[in-house]
Amino acid sequence: MYVKRFLEEKTDEEHPAVLADIVAYLAGIGITANGRTVAQDVEQLIDSGVDVVCNKSRPNKYFIGDRYFEIPELKLFIDAAQASRFLTAKRSGRLIDKLLALASAHQAVDLKSGLYYDEQVKPKNENAYHTADKLLRAISEKKRVRFTYYEYGPDKEKAFKHNKKIYEFSPWRFIWNNDSYYVAGYSESHQKVIRFRVDRIASPKVTKLDAAPMPEDFDLAAFAKSVFSMYDGPSVEVTLKCENAMMKTIIDRYGEAVHTQIADPKHFYAKVPVLASKTFYGWVFGMDGAITVAAPAEAVKAYREMLVRASKPFAARKP
């Protein structure tokens, strides 16, 4: 097992080890061995399924081949832990250290390069982490939870919703969106499926009440799209007129299967199903004219009305 640990921690394809390296490592931790016995240990590891690769040479060189995760996969996980607004900097660091332990020491050095924590967007306490743990237990046990929920007021102080109203909620699934963590489920208080941001949940308690069951046909992807991408609004197929450079933006948002058609040498049309809401029109507005609403007429009208409201002085706008 010490030989296995050495190979996992110290070797990779670019940094193989010879038997003498392993013998020296074992001697350093008080284990007497020689090249013959270590070679037998390596063969036993191979026979047990460990991917020890031997480069035949004088002397032979050994390294771990396949690992639980490939380096690009570890990089993705590390970047997610680093960027998460749900994890504190301390918790992110612990998680990253565990991920780095799955690589060789040489690979870990490369993976560490470029790590940076933006303390301004990291939470200061681990309440959300413990809240997620309770929600996960409630999901596993199929029980309801009770909690209060807050936003932030203009003074940056916590403003509890509805005078610290206690919500009763059946959690179904977690959703990761924009580096924040949400939980979706059925709210007894709202009498519908809703989502809560995990780090805004306060004083959660798992009850003994059975949770409302998640319908078999519940489409989590469609629900997430409705609440995060465009919020509430009528479902409509909209034709967007886009500058050619916006094709990557359209594909990023709607996927490669999106229906498009060349409009003229500088533009194309994209037909997309949307929930026609302020959030959708705000997204179009943010494209600064590179994307515009071309059809249907009611969507064009709604977008123009939003532009008119946006052009008015702040004090003249309707509340």
Image (cartoon, rainbow, N blue to C red):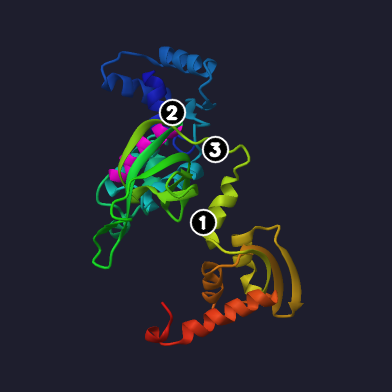
| x and y percentages locating residue 318 in the rendered image | 43, 80
Q: CA distance from mark 1 to mark 3?
A: 18 Å
Whether residue 145 can be seen here: yes
According to the image, label 2 marks what residue? 141
Q: Earlier in the sequence, mark 1 or mark 2?
A: 2
Label 1 amino acid?
Answer: Val
Q: CA distance from mark 1 to mark 2?
A: 26 Å
Q: Locate residue 98: give its quadrant.
A: top left
According to the image, label 1 marks what residue? 227
Quadrant where the image shows the N terminus = top left
Front-lying residue, 314 or 95: 314
Q: Locate residue 97: give its quadrant.
A: top left
* Residue count near mark 2 (Cα–Cα under 10 Å), binned few <14, some 14–19, many ≥20: few
Q: Which residues are magenta?
A: 127-139
Front-lying residue, 158 or 83: 158
Marks 1,2: beta carbons within 8 A? no
52 to the left or right of 248: left
